[in-house]
Image (spheres, helix red, strand yellow):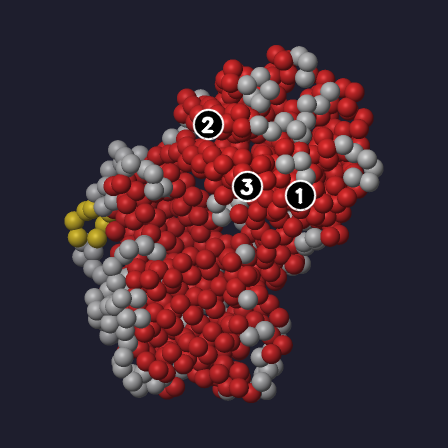
Amino acid sequence: MWDRLAASDPALLRLTAGLRTVAAIVLALAVLAPLGADVTHLVAGAMAAMVATFAVREKKRTRQAGTLALGLPVALASVSLGALLSPHIVAGDLFFVVLIFCAVYGRRYGERGTALGLIGFQIYFLSLFVRATVPMLPALYGTIALAFLCSAVARFVLVPQTPAGTLDGLRRAFRARLAQLVEAQIELLGAGPEDVDKVLGEVRVGTARLHETALLIQSRLEDGTSEEAVARLLQRRIADAEIAAERLGLLLLTARSAERADTLTLHLPGAPLPSGGELPVRDASAAEVRHALEALRLLVLRPVGEDSGSSLSGLRNLLLGYREEENLPEAPSAVQDVFRGIGEAARAVLGLRIALDGPQDESGDSPATARSREELDAEDAAIAGEEAEGEEEPTGLRRPTTRAAVQVAVGSTLAIVGGELLSAHRWYWAVLTCWIVFINTASTGEILVKSYRRLLGTVLGVVAGIGLAGLVGHHTWTAFALVLLFVFAMFYTAPLSYTLMSFFVTAMLGLLYTLLNTYSMSVLLVRVEETALGAACGVIAAAVVLPVRTDRRTNELLVAVLDRLADVTRAAADQLSGGLPADLLDRARELDQALADLRASTQPLTHPITPLRSRRDTARYVVALLETCAYHARALAATAELLPAHPSIAADPRLRGAGRRIVHNIEAISGHVADPRATSEVETGPSIASLLRPGTLATPRYDRVTDRVLRHLQRLDEAVTGLARPLRVPVGARKG
């Protein structure tokens, strides 16, 4: 059960966020209530504690403490201006717009600038919500200061979270998700015609979730490890395990079909299975394959302190033995490839354990296991860090934070004017919605989808709020208990569903209105109207003021993905051909991050409500092809980095020519996406797999590894060429 929880919520990040926020609110209420605070100040304290907790997102505790300390004077100044300007409508509105601009612009200064801007905006909103006046300021100062103190206690004492602890939790999540993926692969092995599509979908989801966890680990390595060498070693082992697991899925698909599986099958929902894929493996080796997969899952799941037994040592020896040709069972070649894949996956698991937990018990090692350990030790010694090159950032109105600040200021101005026409007392809901739809969005389409989700969640939350307000009545502490429940649910579900988060926010507000004795049916209906108005103002501002259309945004990100793909492919092919070593894994992770950004930006195109079905299918197909390309590029990069230390891999100068053609095609596609008038074409020629002809490779000793390299190059070449058709890039005549 703990493994499943760790897999569903990596490092318990969502659970921690929810518990920490609830703890801060409970602590603030527990201190304010005995002091005789009225309901208004209880609500203000709860809201300030919530803001102080969720606004600070930095990873290092010292940075968190500094931001929290700076946030208190910002909050006090914000509530003071809110109270002072409340009688002066025009001046107050103008200041609110300026505050919004500064808060959004502050995002360019990183997590601290984002947090201080968020605190300033939300506390000003709080002053409007509780209708703060100048006589109330001394009590509000004390309430807000106490709320920040309670937030600090919750963050650093009650629900602490260190970078190293978070990284350790992500490691456990990676292990749990890897085990779940192996479990899905076991089911795929024997799935019948009626179940195979469902099981293949589970394999796809498991592969994607494993990759998501790998990216999370990558983002936490710098802060979660004490030395750069340790971070690079862990990065290497995570990449090995991810690649081995994905390759194993492909080998299983091939083993149960009449032809080699396409990597696209693992990345594109609904992609057809290889020919014959509806029939499970039923030969005599199927039971042995299943046994080996179950042993691999056991090795992945078993904690380090429990893996010293002779039975587990024997399982590890058995699986690592499959890396040796003489230990492979008698079976068809495709099934033998599965055993090889299991052996490589077991080696990746062993390397991950050594990287995370140090040297292991070697007393029961077989010769094959000892050789695997020697290979891992040699690779560890060869790992060296290199400094990443900085990228030039855009300036002026081309900078995303500046553009967003101008857009949200214009949208907020429209929301203030329209909101006051709807309600002189609740107009700030329109401004809040306009502000929120610009958070973590970069194009008009993204803002439109987020606005739709917020409005849907608000409507459903109003329905729930009406029912809850009637049930709670004037039971103050019952209402506060439900508010705490909704706050936890809001933060726990935020990364999963923006609609659900909006639902819980609105339901919570209905209870807060009840506590403030301002609840009525008309208030909640105004909430819906103001939300719709704020969303509309945000969409209008994004579409008219310095617009970044979805097509332009996705094209920019697509070019970035292609450029990074070309960079990884060029460097990997060069190193595999005998060139100088390069920092390949960092480049591969930059490719993964660029692809994740592209995938997020295509959500407006792939959303179920989009009326453009053909564009939705094209976007999904292109992203799936790029995920296929990224997988093969990662595999090539990981293999190339082994060259300096691995005795079974030799450089082959012939690979440089194959890599050159692939890089040319990637650059040709990138050029056409950036400028449709470009004249470059995608080149075609002899299959890279033709290099597998006898006599082409160096010596038989290196056949198996070089065969894998060539297959990755072949699949990458096919996937890159496949991108030409949906992106309408001309394909030249076949050469050679």
Q: Amino acid at mark 1?
A: Thr
Residue 293, percent from left and from top: 41, 76
Between circles 2 and 1, the one closer to the viewer is 1
Q: Which residue is mark 1?
A: 478
Mark 1 crowd level (few <14, some 14–19, many ≥20, 10 Å Cα): some
Mark 2 crowd level (few <14, some 14–19, many ≥20, 10 Å Cα): many
Tell me which numbered mark, 3 or 2, is placed earlier along the sequence.
Answer: 3
Considering the numbered disc 1 on the image, is that residue within a helix, a strand or a loop? helix
Q: Is residue 296 above or below residue 513?
A: below
Residue nearer the viewer, 245 or 359: 245
- Answer yes or no: do the residues labelled 2 and 1 have beta carbons within 8 Å? no
Considering the numbered disc 2 on the image, is that residue within a helix, a strand or a loop? helix
**Distance from label 2 to label 1 (Cα)?**
30 Å
User: Residue at 44% of width from left, 72% of height from top?
Assistant: 345
Q: Which residue is mark 2?
A: 532
Residue 427: image quadrant is top right
Tell me which numbered mark, 3 or 1, is placed earlier along the sequence.
Answer: 1
> Is 226 placed left or right of 379 in the picture?
right
Between circles 3 and 1, the one closer to the viewer is 1
The tag on residue 504 is 3
**Distance from label 3 to label 1 (Cα)?**
16 Å
